[in-house]
Image (cartoon, rainbow, N blue to C red):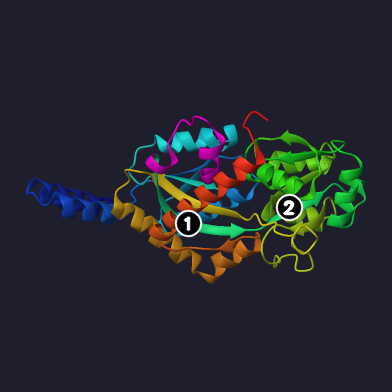
Amino acid sequence: MSRRHSSTLARGCASAVLLGTAAVAAGACWAQAYPARPIRIIVPFAPGGGNDIAARFVAQMFNESFGQSGIVDNRPGGGSTVGTAIASKANPDGYTILVSHNAMAINPSLYARLPYDTARDFVQVALIATTTNVLVVHPSLGVKSVKDLVALLAKKPRAYNYASTGAGGTSHLAAEYFMQLTKTDMVHVPYKGTGPALTDLVGGSTQFMIAAAPGTLGFVKGGRMVALATTGTRRWAQLPDLPTLAEAGVPGYQFDTWYGAHAPSKTPRELVARLNAEINKALAVPGLRAKLTEAGLDPAGGSPEDFGKFMREELERMRRIVVASGAKPEQ
């Protein structure tokens, strides 16, 4: 949009508001003028994981569709609470969104007190993608299957370490759930994000991790990690010969990861709808869908209302898992 046209539109919108048609006209005009500057995309995790991949997909979409830069701002720490708190306090003008994952549903049950209220401080924009997780181990363990791993862990309780992206995060809860069902025990080593956790697993400082599939693919194909199973209800297209944990001898196990866009709760409905429409449009473009798929993500989409319903269901499901695991953020 040209500067002259933007100025004319702004004067027209101001006139509409002064004439008493603010409720409809102002929102419509704002949506037409939007976006006029770069959009900040807060990622509450370190670079290198699936959350970061999803956010950079959104950034590319903004660049191509809006003609404005999408600037990814990684703010790791506190099991995603640091970056999420920053996003909750952002100006609700459509120029800040949060791209997060299961932690949005986990943290309300994990922490006694949060610096934000998930239900009150955010509105759901769109579910971007989902992915399975992969159970990976360091090659030095010498195991070739989940049954081999369970036998080894049962023989030597707490002799091995498992990495996570942070206490109470998806990889932590997924591993705790695994240990519950297999009656095994390992020592938890939390990190600030997928990238650092996978780096130390490759280096041998830890021996086990259940991590979002996209971040593990290169390491597995390069032989630097051994993948034993996935955590979903069906096999992962990128590694079709890899069984699910349920198939591999842990019946009932299921723990997928999802990535979604959220905005501060007072963001105008028109802007939420615009952001949702652009994300859905991008998810329908074959080339962009292919990039997500190549990274191990399954494109999702849907309306803000769809994502809102999904979030309510996830909040309850994660509450049950957190309570059963006994997980604490200080672990």
Q: Is residue 85 magenta?
A: no
**Residue 285 x/y as whole percent:** 50, 69
Q: What is the distance, in whole Å, between disc 2 and disc 1 at their CAs?
A: 26 Å
Hey, what amino acid is under mark 2? Thr
Does 105 appear above or below 79? below
The location of residue 310, given as percent across then percent down, is 47, 56
- Report the amino acid beneath label 1: Phe
Counting from the top left corner in percent of width and height, residue 53 is at 59, 52
Determine the residue positioned at 41% across, 51% down.
124
Q: Which secondary structure, mark 1?
A: helix
Q: Which mark is residue 216?
A: 2
Residue at horizontal 83%, vertical 36%? 205
Task: Please say whether residue 77 is visible from this viewpoint.
Answer: no
Q: Quadrant of the N terminus?
A: bottom left
State the residue position of label 1: 310
What is the magenta range? 103-120
Neighbour tally class for label 2: few under 14, some 14-19, many 20 plus, Cα within 10 Å: many
At mark 2, the secondary structure is: helix
The residue mark sitting in front, 2 or 1, is 1
Is there any visible trace of residue 227 in the rendered image? yes
From the image, which quarter does the C terminus lie in?
A: top right
